[in-house]
């Protein structure tokens, strides 16, 4: 099973504004590379991140992770050949 989080960009930007944080400052607080934050906030295509990273960002913004991210659970089927 694989869990991926999709950012709710508007909610994250609002939470950042409430805290007075820019992308760099959020990265420092969350201990996440600024480039990672920039990618999922600025990219037009959907960019998913790991649950660990999503939780770090939510903690840094003092928000519930589900306020900031949607998640998908995917079953991974592996075929083994003998």
Image: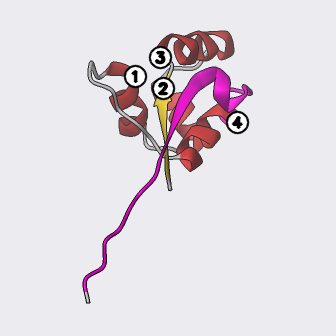
Where disc 1 sits, the SS reads: helix
39 or 74, which is in the foreground? 74
**Among numbered discs 3 and 4, the one appearing first in the sequence:** 3
CB atoms at circles 2 and 3 under 8 Å apart?
A: yes
Q: Residue at position x 31%, y 71% from top?
A: 79
CB atoms at circles 1 and 2 under 8 Å apart?
A: yes
Q: Quadrant of residue 11?
A: top right
Camera-nearest label, 4 or 2: 2
Where disc 2 sits, the SS reads: strand
Q: Find the magenta span and give its range.
A: 59-81
Q: Which mark is residue 69?
A: none
Where residue 32 appears, x then y in whole percent? 50, 44
Q: Kindly give the residue lying farthest to the front in the view shown.
A: 82
Residue assigned mark 1: 41
Q: Is residue 8 above or below residue 17?
A: below
Q: Residue at position x 67%, y 10% from top?
A: 18
Left or right of 58, for residue 73 = left
How many other residues sit within 10 Å of disc 2, few (<14), some (14-19) or many (≥20)? many
Cα separation, mark 4 vs mark 1, equals 17 Å
**Among numbered discs 4 and 2, the one appearing first in the sequence:** 2
**Among numbered discs 4 and 1, the one appearing first in the sequence:** 1
**Among numbered discs 1 and 2, the one appearing first in the sequence:** 2
Residue assigned mark 2: 7
Residue assigned mark 4: 59
Quadrant housing the C terminus: bottom left
Q: Quadrant of residue 34?
A: top left
CB atoms at circles 1 and 3 under 8 Å apart?
A: yes
Cα separation, mark 4 vs mark 2, equals 15 Å
Where disc 3 sits, the SS reads: helix
Camera-nearest label, 3 or 4: 3
Where residue 20 appears, x then y in whole percent? 62, 14
Residue assigned mark 3: 9
């Amino acid at each position: 099973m694989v869990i991926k989080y999709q950012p709710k960009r508007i909610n994250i930007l609002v939470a950042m504004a409430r805290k007075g944080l820019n992308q760099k400052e959020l990265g420092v607080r969350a201990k996440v590379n600024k480039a990672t934050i920039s990618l999922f906030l600025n990219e037009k295509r959907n960019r998913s991140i790991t649950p660990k990273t999503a939780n770090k960002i939510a903690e840094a913004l003092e928000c519930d992770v589900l306020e900031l991210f949607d998640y998908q659970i995917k079953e991974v089927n592996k075929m083994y050949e003998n």
